[in-house]
Image (spheres, helix red, strand yellow):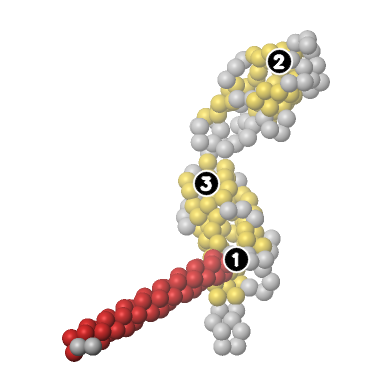
Amino acid sequence: MTHTDLQKGMMTMKHKHNLFRWIMLLLVFSLLANTASVSAASKKKRKKTEAVSKYSLNMISTDLLLSEDTELTVDGITNETVSFKSSDSDVVSVDSGDSDTSCKLTGENVGNATITVKIKEKGFLFFNSTTTTLTCKVTVTPWASSIRFNRKQIKMAPNTRKHVKIILRPSITTEDPVFTSSDPNIARVNAFNKIVAKSPGIAVITATIRNGNTASCRVIVTEK
């Protein structure tokens, strides 16, 4: 073997050695990247799990009519401190509820407000206290001033149902009218605002709102 061949052989071995080092570095880098990815995914999953609160509200959103009130309650409380605050007390006021874990919400003016509930849990020994925040969105609407049916008269077959379409003004109101029937044995309105036809005949469905205004619809239940 000549000196040149020996040099070529050494260069080839050196090249293979360098190539082997690069392959090993790539494998190590790939392993580290994969580990970091798994770790990040695990941390993300852990954070998602930790984000699930043991506390909850009896409602996360609600509609209120002017001067109407409702109770907002926090569930899952043992000995934590709970506070309630309205983002706009001119729209929704907050007062003491039936217990320390509830408050009374009252619609003061038309608009929207968010009720923020803060739950403070005391720390143990050298651990700091933790605070959990929950929110409830409240929409306050006016009472209806007028009401009418979209149809004055409808015909139905016995044992059928039709949705009662009524028009309230102002349109943003969330008031639910009270329905009555002149003859429930012929036709009536169920809890889902549907006219239920019972037997042949004629009945008048009347809808009444708080201010006393009414609307009526004549229901003719035909023979089968």
Among numbered discs 2 and 1, the one appearing first in the sequence? 1
Q: Nearer the viewer, residue 25 or 13?
A: 13
The Cα–Cα distance between marks 2 and 3, rounded to whole angstroms, is 37 Å
- The answer to whether one can see residue 186 in this image is no
Q: Circles 2 and 1: CB distance less than 8 Å? A: no
Q: Residue at x 18, y 86 (%)?
A: 4
Give residue 133's quadrant in the image.
bottom right
Q: Residue at x 52, y 61 (%)?
A: 116
Give residue 179's quadrant in the image.
top right
Q: Seen from this angle, which residue lies furthest left?
A: 4
Q: Position of residue 2 (x, y in %)?
A: 20, 88
Q: Seen from this angle, which residue lies furthest bottom?
A: 3
Element carrying mark 2: strand
Element carrying mark 1: loop
Q: Which residue is mark 1?
A: 53
Q: Which residue is mark 2?
A: 156
Among numbered discs 2 and 3, the one appearing first in the sequence? 3
Residue 192 sits above or below residue 34 on the image: above
Q: Nearer the viewer, residue 126 or 64?
A: 126
Element carrying mark 3: strand
Q: Amino acid at mark 3?
A: Thr
Q: Residue at x 50, y 32 (%)?
A: 170
Q: Circles 2 and 3: CB distance less than 8 Å? A: no
